[in-house]
Amino acid sequence: MDSHEVPLEEKKNLLEFLDKIRRSQEFSGSQRLQDFLTYVVTETLEGRGSQIFGKTIAEDVYNRPASSSIDSSSLVRVDAGRLRRALDSYYNGEGAQDRIRFQIDMGQYAVRFETRPEAVPDRTNKRRNPAIATAAFLAVLITGALGVAYLQSPEPQPVRENPSQRGLSGAQRQAMLNQSPAALEAVDLANQARGLVFPAINPARLTAAKGMYERAIELRPNYYGGHAGLAQIIGMQTFLLPQGVERDALVNLGIRHAKTAVDFSPASAWSLSACAWMEFVRGNIDQARSYSAHALEIDPNDLYAIDYDSLIGVFSGDFDHVARTANPANFEGRDLRRHVFTISYAVANYHLGNYAAAMEAIHEAASLGGPISPISYAYLIAAHQQSGDDSKARALLGDFVIAWPESRLEPVLRRLFVKTGDADTLFDALKAAGWTSAVNRASKPAVTPQR
């Protein structure tokens, strides 16, 4: 969310909570922790949470020059650990009754703003106090994040769930509502979040879905879907980070949630699909394929499981498998909006040398509501280039630069592809059309769209 979208009153309320923490016993004696916390809270409120890295903290909080030869990442990680422990101590003591809590997850620097369930205000009280206003602002944050995520789709539309994917009949929902409304809300949140993941290269989309899964776990800690979905989101986020301690911590967290999902529901396709994705993240390709195959054997109609199966197939180089199993024609009559396997099918055809089929599949995916992202558009450019239509490729490349000027497509995809040569097949074609990475683009003339 851009800063101008944040209501000033709500931002003020959260900053008042920040000031209270800064003046607490845990923080008042450490200016560095105060500065660290102030920075990450402010950046998160300004909509830049996904852009906080150890390097930016070193530069902006510790005033370490970007050109410094000294690696400050270890110092930042140590202080981040101190900050998390200080927050835990504060909320176990002086801040125990705070209605809004600041959370910084392992492997992350952006702040999550949590409302204590028991602190939900009485709806009969019509006076608007700061706590109520702040809780309302948290809802705005989530809604705003979802809105930002949908901006990359040509026609933002609500997600429709197939009955087989919801997993609960009307009678089951009523029984669960009678027993535990919180449990039913957890199931609904997790299922809604499944439709928000793709295009996963969009950090705002991942952040929004991650918050929904975390809330589902808070409401119903033993619900496998919350843990399975969170594991898959975390797995996606690992590819946005370079190799290092932060990424390793995130991988371990994802693995723990995937295993928890299996512990609670070992025969669930969703649980096994989460394990498949985390094994892929760890580089255990054979195990990933085995888990994914088992998931689809259990529920061949779970389109979300097919999404992850297709991603594992594409990025591990099993293009024949994806071309067979992810063909949208196999699912005629199903709602395929936001399902990434429609794009995976196009990608597989590209790598198999079927460039015309790849282009057709990308256009078909767009018409079906498939996730349009820098990845799908890059393959459209490359397919035109490989087909000999240089002028069209360059025109599309110009559109790409305008739509995603800061895209970090190349480093992300190079982390995703198991085989370097598969990534080269794409980027060699893009470079032939005039592609330069976002890192180098600022120093080079922009590609002029050709019509």
Image: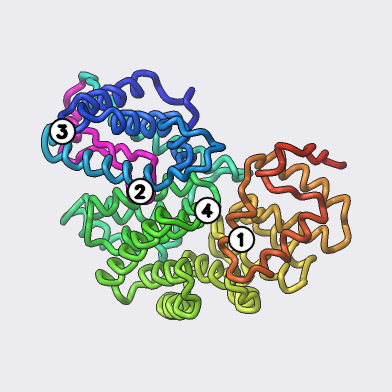
Point out the tag, 1 or 3, that comes first from the N-terminus: 3
C-alpha distance separating marks 4 and 1:
15 Å
Point out the tag, 3 or 4, that comes first from the N-terminus: 3
Task: Name which residue lies at 40% across and 22% down.
Answer: 7
Point out the tag, 3 or 2, that comes first from the N-terminus: 3
Res 212 label? 2
Q: Quadrant of residue 28?
A: top left
Q: Tell me residue 412's x, y (percent).
A: 58, 55
Point out the tag, 2 or 1, that comes first from the N-terminus: 2
C-alpha distance separating marks 1 and 3:
44 Å
Badge 3 is on which residue?
A: 95
Q: Residues within 10 Å of mark 1 (few under 14, many from 20)?
A: some
Badge 1 is on which residue?
A: 414
> Is there any visible trace of residue 416 in the rendered image?
yes
Q: In this orientation, which residue lies closer to the viewer: 187 or 394?
A: 394
- Three-letter amino acid code at the position of disc 1: Arg
Which of labels 4 and 1 is toward the front? 1
